């Protein structure tokens, strides 16, 4: 089966042409576009078709938001997506939407062992339920139900559940974030914007200011979360180091929450741009410290394999496998 596949996120939209037999997937002509530079998905598809000169009868798109009745209001973009409208606009014989993390979950079984970085080996042979927790522009989560023979992916919006502090520092951060946002979800602290929220809270908590060089980088257009993470990696800024330590501990805690809810003895997979770009920081231990910190369930948590997805085309693989299964 040959089809147009896409991964529509708050920061970037990736498109490609997939060939699949429902199990093995290959993707050619991958292109990435800054999502905020376009007013709609249709504009990006038009651009892609002009640049590549290709057209397919079918298309499947992984989208960052809940999908209902072939429509989606994207969570971190002002876009309204309609599969029927896309079919009419481009002459597709069929278009499908699925949640972006559901697409990642569909794509996991299409990956090779070299497409993962292992954080914790766990036990078992991949059988049992699994889950995906991805930190990027937002915090996405999906499940993989094990029926005794194979996994079945399903979407969740678990990243929008209520944040729960665990100590005095985190209670202070919750109060700070409640003043800014009202309700505070896990996505407010475990995401790219979450890194910024934690950093700004710690500046206020310690009554200090950003270093001049960091403010200059941000003023020149650099991504604040990326600057903070890079500064932490080389220990250039104490507040940045504390920010990333707290962020990774919180990421581990929430990944552990998702793993407990799904009983993920089949594996916990970390997706999204943040773990991919901060693998060295993830290996330093703060993430697993938070992941294992589940009281009487600590021994159960240590049985769960934890892996980082290294293959950036995983959502496109998953969208193709999903469409072929339909």
Image (cartoon, grey):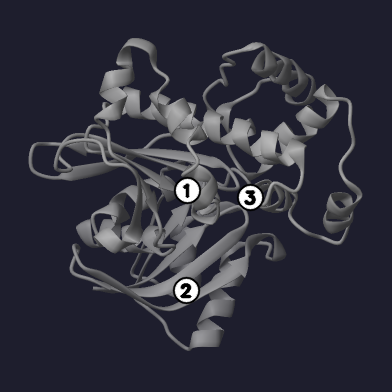
Q: Position of residue 35 (x, y in %)?
A: 63, 61
In this picture, residue 76 sits left or right of residue 289 = right
Q: Position of residue 50 (x, y in %)?
A: 55, 85
Q: Nearer the viewer, mark 1 or mark 3?
A: 3
Distance between mark 3 and mark 2 Cα atoms: 45 Å
Q: Are marks 3 and 2 in contact (CB under 8 Å)?
A: no
- Front in this rendered view, residue 221 or 8: 221
- Front in this rendered view, residue 22 or 240: 240
* Secondary structure found at label 1: strand
In this picture, residue 91 sits left or right of residue 144 = right
Tell me the residue at 53%/54% (across/down): 273
Mark 1 or 3 closer to N-term? 1
Residue at the farthest bottom position = 53
Distance between mark 1 and mark 3 Cα atoms: 40 Å
Q: Are marks 1 and 2 in contact (CB under 8 Å)?
A: no
Name the quadrant containing residue 181.
top right
State which quarter of the image contains the C terminus.
bottom left
Residue 233 shows which numbered tag? 3
Kindly tell me whether residue 291 is visible in this rendering.
yes
Mark 3 or 2 closer to N-term? 2
Tell me the residue at 83%/54% (across/down): 218
Distance between mark 1 and mark 2 Cα atoms: 17 Å
Residue at the farthest left position = 149
In this picture, residue 23 sits left or right of residue 139 = left
- Compared to residue 130, the image places residue 205 above or below, namely above
Residue tagged 1: 71
Residue tagged 2: 90
* Secondary structure found at label 2: helix
Kindly tell me whether residue 157 is visible in this rendering.
no
């Amino acid at each position: 089966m040959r089809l147009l596949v896409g991964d529509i996120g708050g920061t970037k939209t990736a498109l490609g042409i997939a060939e699949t037999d429902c199990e093995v997937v290959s993707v050619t002509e991958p292109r990435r576009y800054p999502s905020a530079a376009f007013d709609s998905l249709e504009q990006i598809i038009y651009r892609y078709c002009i640049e590549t000169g290709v057209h397919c009868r079918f298309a499947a798109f992984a989208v960052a938001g809940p999908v209902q009745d072939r429509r989606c209001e994207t969570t971190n973009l002002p876009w309204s997506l309609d599969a029927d409208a896309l079919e009419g606009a481009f002459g597709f014989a069929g278009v499908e939407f699925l949640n972006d993390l559901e697409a990642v979950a569909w794509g996991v079984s299409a990956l090779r062992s070299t497409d993962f970085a292992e954080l914790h080996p766990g036990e078992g042979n991949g059988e049992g339920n699994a889950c995906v927790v991805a930190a990027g522009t937002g915090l996405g989560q999906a499940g993989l139900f094990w029926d005794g023979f194979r996994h079945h992916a399903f979407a969740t919006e678990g990243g929008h559940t209520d944040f729960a502090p665990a100590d005095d520092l985190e209670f202070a951060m919750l109060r700070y974030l409640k003043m800014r946002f009202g309700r505070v979800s896990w996505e407010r602290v475990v995401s790219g914007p979450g890194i910024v929220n934690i950093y700004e809270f710690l500046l206020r908590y310690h009554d200090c200011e950003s270093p001049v060089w960091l403010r200059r980088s941000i003023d020149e257009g650099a991504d604040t979360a990326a600057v903070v993470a890079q500064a932490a990696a080389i220990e250039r800024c104490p507040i940045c180091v504390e920010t990333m330590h707290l962020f990774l501990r919180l990421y581990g805690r929430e990944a552990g929450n998702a793993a407990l809810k799904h009983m993920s003895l089949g594996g916990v997979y970390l997706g999204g741009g943040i773990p991919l770009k901060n693998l060295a920081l993830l290996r330093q231990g703060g993430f697993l410290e938070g992941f294992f910190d589940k009281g009487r369930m600590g021994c159960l948590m240590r049985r769960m394999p934890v892996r980082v997805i290294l293959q950036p085309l995983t959502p496109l693989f998953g969208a193709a496998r999903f469409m072929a299964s339909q």
